[in-house]
Image (cartoon, rainbow, N blue to C red):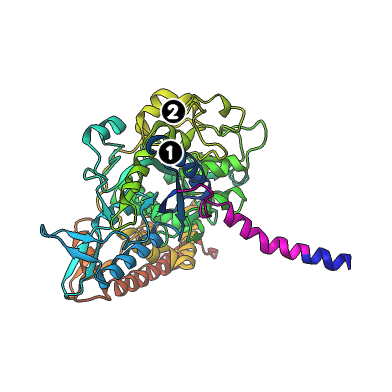
Amino acid sequence: MLARILVILAFLGIVGTPLVIRLTSTDAPDAREDAARLIVVTPHVQQIMTEFDRLFDAWHFDTYGRHVRLEVRRPGGTSEILKILEAQFVAAARSGRVSIGADGSPIVERGAIDFDVMFGGGSYDHGRLKSGVKVRLPNGSEATVPMSDSAGFAQSQLDAWFGENAIGAGYLYDPEQFWIGTALSSFGIVFNRDILTRLGVPEPASFEDLCDPRLMGWIALSDPRQSGSITTSLDAILNYYGWEKGWRVLMGMSANARSFTNMSTKPPIDVAQGEAAAGLAIDFYGRSQAQAVMRPGETSETSRVGFSDPAGAVYIDADPASVLRGGPEPELARRFIEFCMTEEAQALWQFHATNSERGRSNPPGWNGEPMGPREYELRRMPVRRVLYEAHADRFVDRVTPFESASTVKSQGWRTAIPIMMGAFGIDSSSEQRAAWRAMNDARARPDASAETLAELERIFYALPIHTMPDGTQLPFTPENYRAIRESWRDPAHPDWLQRSELSYRTQFVSNYRRVIDLASKVTAPQND
């Protein structure tokens, strides 16, 4: 009988745990009476939303005299969120809830969209909200509808918050206010010191270091076709090194990859667990993993997991919030962004938790309580310069984004990255790794001629020839890229991108086989 009772209790524990988690999350019904409701769609983790929900309610009650709670929706990463929003706008137009105003601008009925704010993601993703989605109206006409609205703050207010609207080569907010940066994100290298020591490889100081042949099978990457954040990181690397060298770096990293995950959060976990030696990571994912495995007495310089953001090469991007067009509560959405720009909200990103020994002495905020998160150290970079000027000594991480951000401007090559990475690496990974191994074995041979090694590299790193719909063949070069990109989007040939991807992959695989064949002539045992 006792055994049976224990089994029943264990079963109830398993079944009940998700319920407890659900009821204690920010998605749960709130006990505050007469609380306004703001529906937020976000890729942010629960810890971030818990801290922001708590402080936003206190700020809103103090400022506007009413409690408010956040209802959080996390359907996935930014790519999934954008797909859901696009589908909602298409459905709203189909049901007659989208119209064209007298000035020709689209009007979306309030409440036609389920969410009020998109919170988090990159400036590129929020720029896609602004660019909008093409919809068909009930009268048969087509219209492009922006999925976000201008926040409408006075320029004097923006100047007070941001000063110069610049971080490296990027903006802190959209000049038309279709998105407002609330934090900063950088993209660097997370690494495992124990694994690197075992492999005899120094700590990576540049993105080129991830192409070291000794790291073959030890690099953790995300699939840029699934992750917008990793695409941003790879695009920054490509722009920093330039077309020719940039593609070589991306191909070398790919050839060293042990796998390609569909989540940008996975590489830091793999590195921390010793399944990979290094990988690309968003700064707060990398630093959070480093903190999670830090032993008592260790520092970020001595712990098993470290994070590096190569100075001058790091793309630092605004992490925005956008008021969604057609959401239920547009004014409350605007107030949420206003709250995110307060010093108290900015302190949530980098201050020590107030329930910790170091956080108890945080400076007070508007309500007299210590600023900073209550429970979770979020380890994000604030977007407002005043936090760095007045409170940098309170930060968990010693970060200087306005000094270290890359000033290299985007060349508009981003759309090529998922396509090329899929063709030369992800979908041909076994062939690429075999060719990479063969080429590096040949490099190690003292009797290999310089001409042969140069030919191996030329073949391995060769970019494909693109065939246009009219049969014209164009080398994949920066000069031809605009024309090639337009052919992928040609409405008269809707399958041209898929056909092109197959062609690219076939060309890369053919080249890899040629590398293996040529390298075998160098590494084969010589008969006396």
Taking the spot 45% from the left edge, 43% from the top edge, the residue there is 67
**Residue located farthest toward the right when viewing the structure as drawn:** 1
Question: Position of 46 compared to 460: left or right?
Answer: right
Taking the spot 67% from the left edge, 64% from the top edge, the residue there is 15
- Quadrant location of the N terminus in the rendered image: bottom right
Front residue of 174 and 521: 174
Start and end of the magenta stretch? 9-34
Point out the tag, 2 or 1, that comes first from the N-terminus. 1
- Say what amino acid the circle numbered 2 marks: Trp
- Asked if labels 1 and 2 touch by Cβ distance under 8 angstroms, the answer is no
Q: Which residue is mark 2?
A: 366
Q: Position of residue 259 (x, y in %)?
A: 52, 60
Residue 196 appears anywhere in the view: yes
- Say what amino acid the circle numbered 1 marks: Phe
Q: Which residue is mark 1?
A: 61
Q: Position of residue 383 (x, y in %)?
A: 37, 36
Residue 450 appears anywhere in the view: no
Residue 385: assigned label: none
Question: Position of 428 compared to 202: left or right?
Answer: left
Image height of 158 relative to 272, above or below: above
Q: Is residue 482 magenta?
A: no
Taking the spot 37% from the left edge, 70% from the top edge, the residue there is 505
Image height of 475 relative to 63, above or below: below
Q: Position of residue 372 (x, y in %)?
A: 50, 33
Dot 2 alpha-carbon crowd within 10 angstroms: few under 14, some 14 to 19, many 20 or more: few
Front residue of 527 and 146: 146
Front residue of 392 and 447: 392
